[in-house]
Amino acid sequence: MDEVKRQAVEHQVWESEWETAFNILLRLKDAIALVISWAESNEEVHNRLLLMCLELMNKMPPVYTKTSEDSSGLTVTINGESSTITHFDVLKSATSIHQPVVRIIAGLFTAKDHAMFLKTSKPGTELQEKIRSLLQSNEDTNLYELALRVLVLCAQTNASLWRRNGFSLVNQIHNYFSPLCRSEMFDRDVLMMQVGAALTPPLKFIIHLLHRFRLDKWATTEFEQDKAAAAQTKPESEDLSKTMVLIAEEFFQCLILIFSERYTYGVGKTNPLDGLKREVVHILCTGSHTFSHIQQKVSHDNNTKRVSLHEAVNQVADFRKPLSTSAGQFHCKESCLPMYSPFFMHYSKSDQSAAEQCQARVRAKMDRVTRSCFPNPLPDYLPFFENLPLILKSNMLIHVFKLVIDRTTRRSRFSSDRVFHKVLYLIGIALNEEEKDPDFGFTHKAEENVGLLGMLEGLLGKQEASICPALLEVTVEKYRKLLKRNSGPPEPVIVETHPMSTAEELKAKRQAKAAEMRQKAMAKMSSMQSKFMKKIEVDESKDETHVKTEGAIKPEDCDNKDEDIVKQIGHDFPVCIGINKWQTEIEKPRILTCILCQEDEVIAPQLGKPMVCAAFIQQSQLFTHKNQKGELMTASSGAISTRDLLTAPATLQYGVDVSTCSHSMHYECYKSLSESNRSRDSLRARQVGQHPHKMVDTESGEFQCPLCKRLSNAAIPILPAYQLTNQIGFSTVSGAANENFEVWVARVKRSLEMPLSSESVTKKGHSRKRSHSERSLLDLEKLSQTSKESDGSPKYSYNATHTDASSTTQLPTSTPTESKIIMNSPPSADDADFYNELAALFVDPETNNANSPTATPTPAGESNPRSSESTSSEAVKKPLSSQIQHAIHTLIRPFPSMSKSKICSTAFDGFEEPIKDLGKNMIKYRRRGNESKVNFIEKHLKGYAISTVTWQSAAHVARAISSYLYYDKKPLFGALNTRQRDCMSAMSRLCASLSHNMQFLLHAVSDMLRVLLCDPPTAKVTQTLGSPLFGTSPSSANPSSTPHSGTNFAFFVQLFNPAGPRKNVNLNILQVDILSLAISLMMTIGWTWNNGVQSMSNTSTKATTHQKSRLLTPDGSVDEAYVLRLALLAHYFQIFATHDESDGEDANMDDGSEIHSNLDPAIIEIMVKLYSICHPDDQPLRRVDVLWKKLEEGAHSLLRPVALLYHYITLVDPPEALKDPSIHSAEALFRYVGLPSKIEEHIQGSLVESLFVMWSLAIPKDDHLLRELVVQPVKPNLLVDLPDRYSQLINRVASFKCPTIPIEESTSNVPTLCLVCGTILCSQAYCCQKIVNKQSYGACRYHMSQCSGSVGMFLRVRDCSLVLMTTRKRGCFRPAPYVDEFGEVDQGFRRGNPLHLNPELYQKLKSLWLQQGITEEVVNYNEIDYRNVQYDWAHF
Ligand SMILES: [Zn+2]
Ligand SMILES: [Zn+2]
Ligand SMILES: [Zn+2]
Ligand SMILES: [Zn+2]
């Protein structure tokens, strides 16, 4: 409300307060509008109100500045005409933007004819006479003086005269024009100017305006001569002229508004709808827009609310249907284009130029009149404003017009293109008036006074008028026409100017001709191009046929140096695994460019420096099984088992996802990049004193890809293809090629069942040593058993008491000599740490979880009793007894691969470091980020752990990519994007290269085979905490009856003690993820062949020490094919075993009748038989087709990932059928991976039956336990289906009560829907926060840990917005996939239109979910909108 005074010398020191006045205005705005329309209803009410306001204003009349003479009046003479006005200079005095009383008065003049008495001399009522005398007693310009000052202030600000006044003024002026306020501010001021123009004599009005704009000197003819004289003494006038011209532009703008804004209610003969239509047309003239954009731009005003914006928009615009994911837009109808005025009152500077550009484009091909944007005929003024146009033909104004045209012709620096344009536009308005009313006489007067037409004609076709040549032409034509109409005889001028227009036409013709020629040239060029292309194609096809005749060599696209160029040799159908496998040779290895140093590198061994590509590793619970409560089977709700070291559990609780943006760099360059990142960040942290809140967590190793800024936290090595190395494929050492599957299975099974002890007894020297370690280990196990039984704790507490209880001296005394041999060095302090870690790692999962910073919260006390047992975890942290330390020491020492050898064969020299780095990272994300444990595993298990983790993670990646392709309805091959392709390729080769680590750990290989080929543990699953684990939860009543007898530790012992007693591995086949197992086995099976003999164990520890390491690699050998086939059968068995007829989709539809669709009766017979093996007590199988479908799905879910993996290992090009999305048959897939081409061929035969009989022992008899099994095949945890209409969601939420405090009135404030399971939660509320590990979590974040793992997607129903969340307290808001009838989303649900689901948008989200891209999306989005950082995402 404060007045502003211009800061002439210094900048504003502090910003003055400005918001309050606007807030008051916003509160009053609607009331003012209502008061004015109320006054309209009755003349007396109106007059009384007017009198009241005038009296109010009279109490505070405008303050004028005194001139040097004593009178406030000042006589201004311009070009011989003069008028006396009061003096005031906006630049030098104070002005306020807020003039509420004046604006109400302005509004009152729009009320019907109630103010008409002011324009007649007839005596009115007493009230009216009072008003009249009040007005006359004051200066007659007082009425609009204040409004004018505000306009002048804005004009001067636009001309940068007020730039020292700071943001307060800028903000005020911004709001003055904003759609929110303008209806009661700017619009009213313009209206007041119109009122003033109607009541004031034209001459006085113009002079008054010129004077207030400080243009009175500028408007004189002598001005320039004076200036020229002044400039010789003062050279600073350059700048002044610019300012002056800018002010002049604003002056003419003001005049244009006075004459052309007749759509304001009560000014012209129009209706509100037309006014709104005009407004919308002008918005659309800046380009096509969405409905919400139009809504935003239209004045927020009660008058416009009365008419339907929707109707107005539909009348002036065409709606273009939304594209699948972008909103629909409105385009201005061509018939409405003439309404456009470049000087529309509600245009901002940027709108104006946007409109100009857009219109130039739209109208380019239209006729000249349309192109010229000549002012459109305007509606007549209402009687009160009738005499307004008279100003247009006042001598004073015509004179100013002349002055401008004259200056333009002379290119004076006191005029500009814009000033000229505006003057032309004003002349156009005047001509329009004359056209309507022949007696108006503008042309006559203008000709008489200054000869305007001649001046305009003089400019035709000249450079000076280049801003609006079309407008000038049209104006001149119209001028002539009107002049002719008025004066009768044609003027000779027409003949004279004719050549001018023909010159124009000639120019147009020339242009047309030039365009034509250009087009011809283009056509010629493109035809030449296409000819050339055709020729190339022919050449290429010639080449191809040529190659094909030579042999089945198919060069892949030759120009692509990004991929290896492969030569393939094979028969008819491409096969990548097994006996008919195609041979591949690399003709030319791929070449990659380092994005950091820009050097090219050939991806081949020994040729160059190792390359890596930026990768992002994250935990993924995409496939993790959910228990019956719908909770994820993550480590927080289940236990970690050492058996995971062998293969992944069926619950898939640790998915480690790897993805890449496929930007490659040297490992060296990557290293130095991360080094500099780290130092820069620590430097910054020191400088700032605290960590800036950043999205990218450099401390945990995150960085952004230097090229594309994608979030990354690791680097995948890009290994050369094995074909380029000196490694030998498994197939060359395998002797399985001449066995069929049945024989192979029988032989391998026999060799697994061979008693191992007999084999080793022969070597006496080692047996004693073994017995020693064996004994100590058995003691250990006993020890743990006793500890468990004694305190009833489910944990193995290796604490001091237990150590004391057992004989501590047993080891060294009993076998002193051996201990010397085995423990050639006593455990160092370093090692002692390791043993502590070991126990903590394998024995107690909770500590692992609690220590990690990124841990997902464990459930609160009552849901999981574990978290409260702090005592047991504390016990584990205590140092281990020396005895156990010795034992483990003994255990691990003998393995060279464990301690000494490299994890990477010599074939991949230089990749040791990058592979180790990545492996460490993967272990970190699998083990939930505990650095010390990662270091431990890395240090002591070396390659073994890295290999198994990598294989499991590769299984996850391949499974995720293949299911993404499946749900996106894309073929398995041919639709992969570069990222997916490079990720699969890198992971596949990494898998194969890590095979190297297993050559001395053949007992681990045989352990894996035992899962498939040995009697499973007796069918009884211990169920604790509802998790089908590996029997590692001994808290059940009777631990000795657990089928997986033995403990984590015993298992560990067995795994690393090849010479020990081979007990059954105790892995229940139903609890193993077959895909991970298959991949691990396929990667390792070849090592079992040695000198043509397949042996399932390394014969002795001594032998392993001296064995020379071999260079072997999986290459799709027959063994691999057989392992895959066996795994497939095992997977079929899992499906049979977990199939439950009663929960089929339409189980009760058929009552007893058998529906077998169109299956072969022979198949039905087999299926029924196999089913009865698995379910001997159940009714025979009725819906064979349902189970059959599951088998097909299962085969796909297992083989598609394997096919992807082996494609990139062997580089055999897949058959066309796998690249075609329309082919659904599995036959091509089966044949490609070397399997019989039909499922029936897989499941028939006595071998299958006998395997099923053996495996069926694993099926628990207990119904309850049966139901706890993971039902195969596994499906990804997809997003739920959403209702079609948003109102359905709202209704669902309306009745939702906070689950924590279910009081009647406490309906949840922020009801939020989990899109993964469909649960509604009470988000962002204290009532539903949960405290886990002393940290509080909001309902969503807590739910996320139970439902979707490390990322979550939620829908806030009342806001209609999505919340994406990831770990580390990051998150972002996105619009929900609901759109209104215009295809627009409504984030925040502000407009409140009826919304419906946009399936394409939702599909996009589903894809994002399947691609596990949430974290990336969140980080990317925060780059765009940093405001997301400020939310407290932990409490959502
Ligand atoms: Zn480089
Ligand atoms: Zn990148
Ligand atoms: Zn959920
Ligand atoms: Zn609540």
Image (tube, helix red, strand yellow):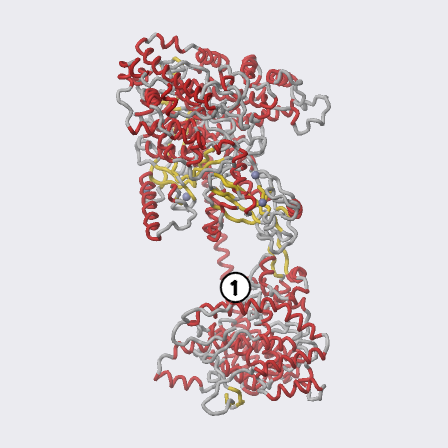
Outermost residue on the bottom side: it is 70
Whether disc 1's CB lies below 8 Å from ligand 2 is answered no
Q: Nearer the viewer, residue 795 or 1271?
A: 795
Quarter holding residue 1157: top right
Give above or below for 1150 relative to 1290: above
- The answer, for residue 336, to whether it is visible in the render is yes
Give above or below for 1168 relative to 88: above
Q: Nearer the viewer, residue 1007 or 1212?
A: 1007
- What percent of the width, then of the height, locates residue 1412? 50, 39
Give above or below for 623 relative to 769: below
Residue occupying the point 57% across, 19% down: 1260
Label 1 sits on a secondary structure element that is helix
Instruction: Specify the amino acid type for callout 1.
Output: Ala
- What percent of the width, then of the height, locates residue 1129? 53, 20
Q: Nearer the viewer, residue 1195 or 1097?
A: 1097
**1116 displayed left or right of 275:** left
Residue under numbered circle 1: 354
Total tally of numbered discs in the picture: 1
- The answer, for residue 491, to whether it is visible in the render is no
Tell me which image quadrant ligand 3 sits in.
top right
- What percent of the width, then of the height, locates residue 1408? 52, 41
**232 displayed left or right of 1217:** left
Q: Residues within 10 Å of mark 1 (few under 14, many from 20)?
A: some
Q: Nearer the viewer, residue 869 or 849?
A: 869
Residue occupying the point 57% across, 22% down: 1238
- What percent of the width, then of the height, locates residue 387? 64, 82
